[in-house]
Image: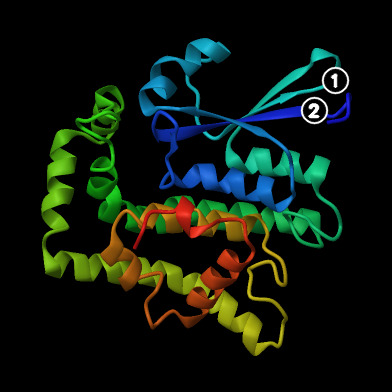
Amino acid sequence: MHIDTPSLTLYLLCQYPERPMSFAPHGWKTVLPLRYLNVPYETVYVTLAELRQVLPKTFGMEKVTLPLLVVKEFRGKVQTIMDSYNIAQYLDKHYGTPEKSLFASDPELGRHYSRFIEHWVDRSLAAEIRPCVLHSSYDLFPEDGPHADIASRSAFLAKCGQARMDEMTALNSDPEWTSKQYSAVRKELGIIETVLAERSRNGESGLFLGGTRPVHADFCVYAFYPYSRTNKELVRETWHHESLPYVRKWLQAMQDEGLVSESQLLKV
């Protein structure tokens, strides 16, 4: 690394020490742009308990959210960036090129488009997916054995509450409820299906929301695919459903970019 090149450190959640939390969606919103732009960076994995108890003290903040990017610039200046959209803006400004940008060929319009898509994903798509994966995500925190992390498991449960967890566990065992909920997820993904289908009908090239290359908007939507994979049935009945052919093509195109390998995702 050149002496005046900033060093980047990305803080992400881990499922337990030394195992990345592959189903945490917001981390993917930053990991994918970093890989896409070929930006060198180091990763520090923290447990859910450390996020709540240690990082606020480390950074002198009341609350820390992840992903968090620490930029150490030449001459010792340190910049701490939270929120995946803010990180994307920093990365595109310093590492993007006209040929490879997180916001396509029109940066201003691309930023607005990506912000809108991210807002929709976080507010609407996530709201329909979350009830299907709350219980299955919780089950991935080891309760015993060499990787047991009772503190993180307890922190996860404390955030949602035992009553909510019991309710979601019961509902996900109800075929009538899951059928309706999967339909609600497909309805939200149908928005992406419509956008991609419209691009195809208009003869526009590329399988991505950004055209021939993925942009931050693509990464924001894709981030909730690994999250969904904690529930295999959910994935089959939504992301891979026959009623969403363009979403399926888009998923394959995202995989073909080589930014994520199957080994980094939960099996479905």
Per the model, the C-alpha gap separating discs 1 and 2 is 6 Å
Residue at image point 77% right, 46% down:
92
**Where is residue 121 drawn, in percent x and y?**
48, 55
**Residue at the image point whose x is 60% and y is 82% from the top:** 198
Q: Is residue 55 above or below residue 238?
A: above
Q: Which residue is mark 2?
A: 6
Question: In which image quadrant can residue 184 be found?
Answer: bottom left
Whether label 1 touches label 2, CB < 8 Å: yes
Dot 2: what SS? loop
Q: Please tell me which residue lies in front, 44 or 123.
A: 44
Q: Label 1 belongs to which residue?
A: 74
What secondary structure is marked by label 1?
Answer: helix
Q: Earlier in the sequence, mark 1 or mark 2?
A: 2
Left or right side of 51 for 9: right
**In the image, residue 36 lies at what x, y percent?**
70, 53
**Amino acid at the residue labelled 1:** Phe
x and y percentages locating residue 205 in the rendered image: 72, 80
Q: Amino acid at mark 2?
A: Pro
Which quadrant holds residue 207?
bottom right
Q: What is the quadrant of the C terminus in the image?
A: bottom left
In the rendered structure, the answer to whether residue 27 lies left or right of residue 140 reads: right
Residue 162 appears in view:
yes
Image: 60 above or below 189: above
Label 1: few (<14), some (14–19) or many (≥20) C-alpha neighbours in 10 Å: few
Q: Which image quadrant is residue 70 in? A: top right
| Residue name at image x 17 percent, y 58 percent | 172
- Snapshot colouring: rainbow
Residue 224 shows up from this direction: no
Classify 125 as above or below 138.
below
Position of 266 with respect to 258 (left or right) is left
